[in-house]
Image (spheres, rainbow, N blue to C red):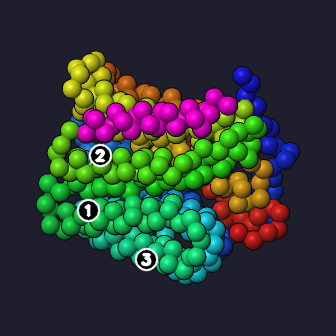
């Protein structure tokens, strides 16, 4: 098996070589520009905050005025992932549905306030009085985002709207989760905080990632791998999303989830095989997406080993499985997918340069270190610090390479 690493120095103009200078006005030209730029900024700030928090623990102090556990899930799940999602869905979604994209002021009124709410959450770590206001701002911005997407679906006459409808349903559950976060921040009813995180992760984030993978991964693969048979039956989509929602429901009801998790693990690992993970290594940009998807099945399998009825050396709280899903699957897929969309929508060659490929594998290594931190209690803090510091470095380098693209006109002179 050979892996082709593309040298993009000649084929792909660097940001500094594009026509025109950096301009914030470029962010309003397409939803993905604003969503990816603001999401990338929030991602870096959130990772840096958590690294500082971990470092402070080595000296027995906290950099946050609020208990870090209160904001960790809200920032790491709800801080940046939804901003990236809006940038993608408002750009690609109208094409799925055969409708015009939402007007620029309309989608800006969702993306910008939501990102501001995320920044407010970061500031709330030092100024707790901001927590409630930032949470309310996020909840209202997301409600507006849902209405925008519902309007695009309603305007569509496309025969196939199942992916769009499932995303809308997941967005609605996300709106419920964010409203619950706001309720907790206002009323101090801490017992609802875990339900907020469950709704956000299992109700919205994982389902949206799986829906987009079902629609796009076989599509991307068939375009670059030959021979390749696209396999994405409808039943697979409904079982993946339905299984994740069932896990979330059982978690809220405090019922054991391991039977559902085991079935999901088997289904997702089988899907990774059917989508020809091994074959994808011919094209690094595509392989990044397939490797990230593999983590979905591995994460569910880890949950079974950690929380199932069989005692094993991996038995524990389930945090390793959750981080395998959050870091290995969602964060890796975000890096891979956003890179692909960024290159394609900026008129650049769809190839992964050495830096991107290296950073992706660094993220895989850091994910493994984070999982080891759950199992090697004596080395927990050093491993968490190493993983946290590495992720700040990885996404700082990725951002330095890609965020300027959103502030520049396309080098081919086209719009978008």
| Eye-nearest disc, 3 or 2 | 2
Q: Position of residue 127 (x, y in %)?
A: 27, 62
Label the magenta part by its dominant secondary structure.
helix
Corner quadrant of residue 6? top right
Distance between mark 3 and mark 2 Cα atoms: 26 Å
Q: Earlier in the sequence, mark 1 or mark 2?
A: 1
How many numbered markers are drawn? 3
- Structural crowding at the residue carrying mark 3, measured as other residues with C-alpha within 10 Å and reported as few (<14), some (14–19) or many (≥20): some
Element at label 3: helix
Query: What is the residue that sits farthest to the right in this orientation?
Result: 10
Of labels 3 and 1, earlier in sequence is: 3
Task: Say the numbered circle drawn on residue 247.
Answer: 2
The percent coordinates of residue 401 (x first, y second) are 66, 49
Badge number at residue 181: 1
> Residue beneath label 3, please?
147
x, y percent for residue 172: 36, 66
Say which residue appears at 38% left-offset and 57% top-offset. Answer: 204
Q: Quadrant of the N terminus?
A: top right
The residue stretch that appears in magenta = 257-279
């Amino acid at each position: 098996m050979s892996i082709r690493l593309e040298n993009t120095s000649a084929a792909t103009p660097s940001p500094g070589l594009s026509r025109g200078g950096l301009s914030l006005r470029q962010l309003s030209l397409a939803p993905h520009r604003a969503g990816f730029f603001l999401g990338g900024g929030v991602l870096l700030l959130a990772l840096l905050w958590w690294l500082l928090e971990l470092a402070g623990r080595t000296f027995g102090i906290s950099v946050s005025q609020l208990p870090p556990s209160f904001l960790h899930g809200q920032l790491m799940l709800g801080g940046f992932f939804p901003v990236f999602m809006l940038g993608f869905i408002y750009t690609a979604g109208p094409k799925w549905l055969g409708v015009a994209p939402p007007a620029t002021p309309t989608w800006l009124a969702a993306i910008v306030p939501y990102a501001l709410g995320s920044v407010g959450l970061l500031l709330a770590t030092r100024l707790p009085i901001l927590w409630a206001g930032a949470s309310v701002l996020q909840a209202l911005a997301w409600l507006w985002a849902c209405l925008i997407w519902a309007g695009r679906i309603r305007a569509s006459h496309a025969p196939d709207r199942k992916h769009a409808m499932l995303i809308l349903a997941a967005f609605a559950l996300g709106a419920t989760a964010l409203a619950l976060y706001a309720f907790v921040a206002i009323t101090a009813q801490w017992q609802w905080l875990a339900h907020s995180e469950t709704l956000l992760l299992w109700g919205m984030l994982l389902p949206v990632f799986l829906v987009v993978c079902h629609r796009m991964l076989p599509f991307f693969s068939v375009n670059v791998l030959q021979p390749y048979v696209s396999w994405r039956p409808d039943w697979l989509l409904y079982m993946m999303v339905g299984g994740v929602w069932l896990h979330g429901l059982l978690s809220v009801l405090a019922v054991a989830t391991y039977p559902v998790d085991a079935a999901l693990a088997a289904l997702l690992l089988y899907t990774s095989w059917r989508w020809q993970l091994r074959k994808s290594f011919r094209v690094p940009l595509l392989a990044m997406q397939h490797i990230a998807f593999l983590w979905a099945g591995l994460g569910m399998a880890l949950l079974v080993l950690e929380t199932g009825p069989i005692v094993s050396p991996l038995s524990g709280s389930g945090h390793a499985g959750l981080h395998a899903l959050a870091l290995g699957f969602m964060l890796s897929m975000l890096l891979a997918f956003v890179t692909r969309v960024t290159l394609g929508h900026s008129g650049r060659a769809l190839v992964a340069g050495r830096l991107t490929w290296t950073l992706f594998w660094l993220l895989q290594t850091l994910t493994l270190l984070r999982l080891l931190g759950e199992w090697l209690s004596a080395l927990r803090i050093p491993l968490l610090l190493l993983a946290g510091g590495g992720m700040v470095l990885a996404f700082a380098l990725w951002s330095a390479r890609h965020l300027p693209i959103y502030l520049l006109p396309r080098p081919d002179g086209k719009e978008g």
